[in-house]
Amino acid sequence: MHGQPFEVPLRAPTLAITSDRMQAPELSARLAERGIFTWAGHFYAIRPMELLGLLVRGGVVRAGISAYTTPDDIEAYAEALHQELRG
């Protein structure tokens, strides 16, 4: 996971994730097959992604948590992500 730790006050509820097993667009597509909808790319942060070596890997997978996101949604996302990253 990239970004501020969860303990930081007023942290944005957006998760940016990468995997050593697959590029961001593939991971995002595989999560979509499980009903988990994320986005993949550079999100207009091209230079930072480039400097972090993430641009050549398709950027990051981005998931957002909002007021309408339920604990069950978060659990489903965590489970799907865990299954995809473990293989």
Image: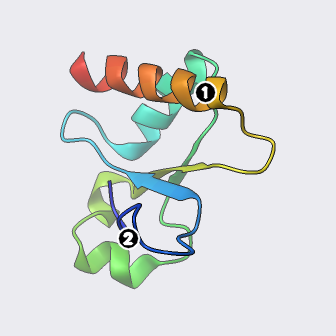
Kindly identify the residue that appears in the image at 38 percent across and 53 percent down: 58
Instruction: Residue at 45% x, 28% y: name it.
Output: 78
Colouring mode (rainbow / by chain / secondary structure / one colour)? rainbow
Residue 50 position, x and y percent, is 30, 75
Give percent across and percent down for residue 23: 32, 42
Mark 1 and mark 2: Cα distance apart in space: 23 Å
- Number of other residues with Cα within 10 Å of mark 1, as a class: few under 14, some 14 to 19, many 20 or more: some
Q: Which residue is mark 2?
A: 4
Asked where in the image residue 49 lies, by quadrant, the reply is: bottom left
State which quarter of the image contains the C terminus: top left
At mark 2, the secondary structure is: loop
Question: Which of the labelled discs sits on residue 36, or is there none?
Answer: 1
Is mark 1 in CB contact (under 8 Å) with mark 2?
Answer: no
Of the residues shown, which amino acid type is indicated by label 2? Gln
Side of 43 relative to 83 (left or right): right
Identify the residue at horizontal 55%, vertical 68% (top origin). Answer: 43
For mark 2, does the 10 Å Cα neighbourhood hold few (<14), some (14 to 19), or many (20 or more) residues? few
**Is 32 left or right of 7, judged from the image as shown?**
right
Residue type highlighted by circle 1: Ile
Q: Does residue 5 sit above or below 32 in this rendering?
A: below
The label shown at residue 44 is: none
State the image quarter where residue 14 is shown: bottom right
Residue at 24% from the left image edge and 73% from the top image edge = 52
Q: Residue furthest right?
A: 68
Q: In the rendered view, would you say 64 is above or below 86?
A: below
Rendering coords of residue 39 (x, y %): 58, 47
**Where residue 54 sits in the image (x, y, percent)?**
29, 63
The picture quadrant where one finds residue 19 is top left
Image label count: 2
SS assignment at label 1: loop
